């Protein structure tokens, strides 16, 4: 039988089909997508006077978190010429004798009048917030990053700052324990600042995580370790 062009195309097609059906296909799996580095939770930590917030910060550092005290940031801001000049212009040179801001004098003016307190907070908190943001960015660039970024803000809920954080922690303690701690620090009576704080129950109700700190340091460590595990999920 003569081989026609039609026959040739049929045989060629059959041969190619047979070759592909019998020869194992070589496939190359796409590389797995790169995992983005873990972003540590940005946490606002609060608590009443004598609850042990500073002790909690120390334990968190031991557990691998990075911490910042908003009170320390406030101290730094009062040392800047911009804020010093602002409070002197508002209340006079008596609040900065020798060019150094007297925070007790500032508090006497600020807490004596709601309008004065509102002015101070409107002046101070944007500066503190900007420094907190800069600190957060710096910490997120470390390799490896901290387990969490925790900022202590005593008036977190009172100042309406909880929205700036991914989550919140309230440190609470038995009232007798708090009274003993305050007494040991010479703060048997609540200050004006303490009087405007929410109660422990209110802070605990608003916080995402509540950590009890009435016992030993090891008990506090276990509670905070569990909180960090929860934040890392």
Image (cartoon, rainbow, N blue to C red):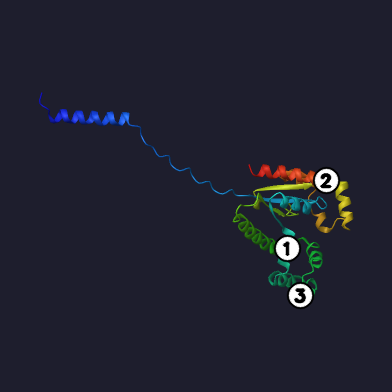
Asked whether 38 or 17 is in front, the reply is 17
Please indicate whether residue 220 sits to the left or right of residue 185 in the image.
Answer: left
The residues tagged by marks 3 and 2 sit, at their Cα atoms, a distance apart of: 43 Å
Question: Which of the image's four quarters has the C terminus?
Answer: top right
Identify the residue at image location x=75%, y=53%: 58
Residue furthest to the front in view is: 23
- Give the mark, 2 or 1, whose residue is nearer the N terminus: 1
The reply to whether discs 1 and 3 touch (Cβ–Cβ < 8 Å) is no
The residues tagged by marks 1 and 3 sit, at their Cα atoms, a distance apart of: 17 Å
- Whether 104 is drawn above or below 40: the answer is below
Please indicate whether residue 178 sits to the left or right of residue 44 in the image.
Answer: right
Mark yes or no: residue 208 visible: no
Q: Which mark is residue 74?
A: 1
- Give the mark, 1 or 3, whose residue is nearer the N terminus: 1
Residue furthest to the left in view is: 2
Q: Which mark is residue 216?
A: 2
Identify the residue at image location x=72%, y=58%: 70
- Give the mark, 3 or 2, whose residue is nearer the N terminus: 3
The residues tagged by marks 2 and 1 sit, at their Cα atoms, a distance apart of: 30 Å
Element at label 3: helix
Q: Which residue is mark 3?
A: 99
Residue furthest to the top in view is: 1
- Neighbour tally class for label 2: few under 14, some 14-19, many 20 plus, Cα within 10 Å: few
């Amino acid at each position: 039988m003569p081989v026609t062009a039609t026959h040739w195309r049929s045989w060629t097609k059959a041969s190619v089909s047979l070759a592909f059906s019998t020869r194992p296909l070589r496939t190359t799996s796409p590389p797995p997508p790169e995992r983005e580095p873990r972003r540590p939770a940005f946490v606002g930590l609060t608590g009443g006077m004598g609850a042990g917030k500073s002790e909690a910060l120390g334990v968190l550092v031991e557990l691998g978190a990075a911490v910042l005290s908003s009170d320390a940031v406030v101290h730094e801001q009062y040392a800047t010429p911009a804020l010093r000049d602002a409070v002197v212009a508002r209340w006079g040179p008596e609040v900065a004798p020798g060019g150094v801001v007297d925070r007790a004098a500032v508090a006497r003016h600020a807490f004596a009048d709601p309008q004065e307190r509102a002015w101070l907070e409107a002046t101070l908190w944007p500066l503190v917030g900007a420094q907190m943001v800069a600190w957060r960015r710096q910490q997120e660039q470390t390799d490896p990053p901290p387990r969490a970024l925790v900022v202590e803000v005593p008036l977190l809920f009172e100042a309406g700052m909880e929205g700036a954080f991914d989550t919140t922690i309230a440190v609470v303690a038995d009232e007798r324990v708090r009274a003993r701690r305050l007494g040991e620090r010479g703060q048997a009576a609540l200050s004006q600042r303490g009087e405007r704080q929410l109660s422990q129950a209110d802070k605990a109700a608003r916080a995402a995580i509540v950590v009890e700190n009435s016992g030993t340091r090891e008990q506090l460590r276990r509670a905070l370790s569990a909180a960090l595990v929860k934040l890392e999920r």
